Image (cartoon, rainbow, N blue to C red):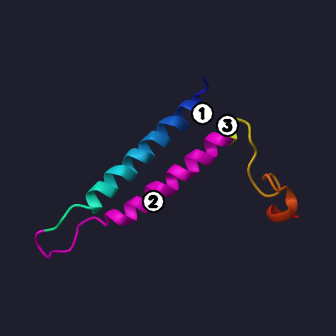
């Protein structure tokens, strides 16, 4: 197993864990009317985006090329 694959899998697991934890924290009920110190819903979006990037990187490591003109539909929608 290469180091790139191992680091990508660790990053993917950490991203999913951060997304789940942020979702849990965003859903907790609030007793007072003070503003929240941390925007947990924004952290959900950030960790979800980072997890998606790790997933795309994992697919690239496994041999499928992504990018313009490299998709399943060829160059029709992905490039010139």
The label shown at residue 69 is none
Residue at 74% over, 41% down: 64
Residue with the mark numbered 1: 4
User: Which image quadrant for residue 43?
Assistant: bottom left
Residue at 36% over, 50% down: 20
Q: Spatial distance from mark 2 to mark 1, Cα to Cα?
A: 22 Å
Quarter of the image for the N terminus: give it: top right
Residue with the mark numbered 2: 46
Residue lying farthest to the left in this orientation: 32
Q: Give the range drawn in magenta.
A: 31-59
Q: Spatial distance from mark 3 to mark 2, Cα to Cα?
A: 23 Å
- The answer to whether 16 is drawn above or below residue 8 in the figure is below
- Answer with mark 2 or mark 1, whichever residue precedes in sequence: 1
Residue at 37% over, 49% down: 18
Residue with the mark numbered 3: 61
Q: Please provide percent x and percent y for residue 79.
A: 83, 63
10 Å crowding of disc 2: few (<14), some (14-19), many (20+) = some
- Horizontal side of residue 24 vs 47, given as left or right: left
The answer to whether the residue labelled 2 contacts the one labelled 1, judged by CB atoms less than 8 Å apart, is no
């Amino acid at each position: 197993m290469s180091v790139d694959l191992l680091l990508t899998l660790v990053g993917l697991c950490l991203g999913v864990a951060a997304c789940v934890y942020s979702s849990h924290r965003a859903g907790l009920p609030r007793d007072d009317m003070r503003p929240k110190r941390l925007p947990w819903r924004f952290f959900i979006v950030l960790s979800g985006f980072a997890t998606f990037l790790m997933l795309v990187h994992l697919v690239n490591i496994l041999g499928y090329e992504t990018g313009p003109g490299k998709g399943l539909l060829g160059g029709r929608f992905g490039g010139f």
